[in-house]
Image (spheres, rainbow, N blue to C red):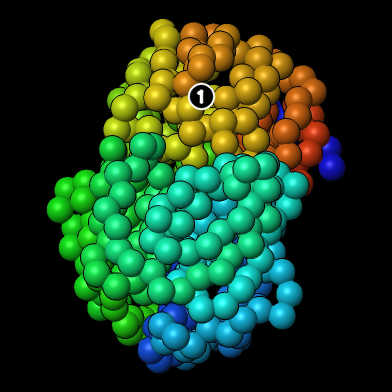
Amino acid sequence: MIRTVRSAARLEGTVTLPGDKSISQRAILLNSIASGSAHVSNLCHGDDRASILSCMGGLGISISAHSNCAQTGAEECFLVEGQGPDGLTEPDSVLDASNSGTATRLVAGLLAAQPFFSVLTGDESLRSRPMDRIITPLSEMGAHIMGRDDNSLAPLAIRGGNLSGISFEQPVASAQVKSSILIAGIHASGETTVVQPAESRDHTERMMHAMGADITIDGPRISVRRSTLSAMDVAVPGDISGAAFWLVAACIHPNARLTIRNVGINPTRAGVLDALQSMGANIQIKNVREIGDEPVADIIAESSQLHGTEIAGDAVPRAIDELPALALAASLASGTTTIRDADELRFKESDRIVATVAGLSSLGADIEERPDGMTIRGVDSLQGAPCDSAGDHRIAMTLAVAGLTATGETTIAGAEAADVSYPGFWHTLNSLTPD
């Protein structure tokens, strides 16, 4: 699908975001193996939601949707009937995580602990993404896992059970890998410890703790022991990764004021806010509160005079999914911005370093690929042109936001990719451009 975006005279309005997909998937998976039933509201939309519901349903978990939920007050919620740590059943067919790397790696950690055989796969893009980073620690714990290409790619054939705890030092900070090991660890004998080289998103640890897991967090070290979780209702906050596009849109547009409601601002995910503020963004964070152990706020973003910055080191894992949008912000900032230590971008739905550089370059940005990131020299304006999403939802949305400020028309091939994480994206974009 090709979408056309034209420059907008003004951006204004209020945004209600889809539920955070990272929290959504963990809420479904952990409640599935908990004792009792739980209601999960504001679940993410799109393929990520379908992936986790399909996988857990294939393992025998009953999950049903309800309208006007009395327990949560939400228009829609999902009732998850937990089966406890030993209640999953061997799937009748292959489990398909589609395009969701989060679902694949979290479910693999769960399957590694189950005393049955299973096969886990995904779409063509997911089958090209490295899985050895979870296969190695899960195999060390005692699971038997076989994949394609010397055990590095899905589909994964898994025979699990009888796991023993390990101490695993992550070579690269990754919340998905960390979570996979911790999920296996609550089923393993002894203690399982993950040592992170840098802080990554901590939704799994927060939710496990809230659900009664025997978990200890000591800086970069997280340790878990065999635990039975108690089911917990979860009201999923708005996805800060989705908010990032509107934050950047407001900051780079010369006539903009946007209010984004109910955004999750977990400090391990708030790197986009820190990066934009370091660039001089006009952002206000209001009404900070906590919902189910997760900090939430409303954010107001307005037109800003941005300047270059550096995004590197520990800041990268906290903003990894938002780096394409931040590269766009840097393209219209004064001075030079350097993004480094971000080679993890090469292993997403696309090689996001290549895709971001190609997409923004086609619109006139002065952006250069680095082995582990990008160097961006700010320009005065972008020019509308044909560009391509590379089949990646975050690239599609980054290019769409760029088109709101570029002169003329920006046409985006593969625009439907946005539906993977944000099915309402195009509707929201239209609603914020009254002209």
Q: Which quadrant of the rendered structure holds the C terminus?
A: top right
37 to 161, vertically: above or below: below
Residue 306 in view in this figure: no
Spot occupied by residue 253 in the image (x, y as percentages of width and height): 53, 27
Q: Secondary structure at mark 1?
A: helix
Residue 415 in view in this figure: yes
Is 104 left or right of 121, judged from the image as shown? left
Farthest right residue in view = 1
Spot occupied by residue 227 in the image (x, y as percentages of width and height): 29, 78
The residue tagged 1 is 327
Spot occupied by residue 232 in the image (x, y as percentages of width and height): 36, 81
355 to 150, vertically: above or below: above
> Mark 1 packing: few (<14 Cα in 10 Å), some, or many (20+)?
many
Q: Which quadrant of the rendered structure holds the N terminus?
A: top right
Q: Nearer the viewer, residue 268 or 296?
A: 268
The structure residue drawn at horizontal position 40% and vertical position 55%, both measured from the top left corner, is: 140
Farthest left residue in view = 218
The structure residue drawn at horizontal position 19% and vertical position 58%, both measured from the top left corner, is: 217
Spot occupied by residue 124 in the image (x, y as percentages of width and height): 75, 47
Q: Nearer the viewer, residue 253 or 200?
A: 200
Is 274 left or right of 331, judged from the image as shown? left
Amino acid at the residue labelled 1: Ala
Residue 337, quarter of the rendered image: top left
71 to 372, vertically: above or below: below
Exactly how many numbered labels are in the figure?
A: 1
The structure residue drawn at horizontal position 73% and vertical position 20%, both measured from the top left corner, is: 384
The structure residue drawn at horizontal position 67% and vertical position 20%, both measured from the top left corner, is: 358
Q: Nearer the viewer, residue 300 or 374?
A: 374
Residue 366, quarter of the rendered image: top right
Q: Nearer the viewer, residue 315 or 58?
A: 58
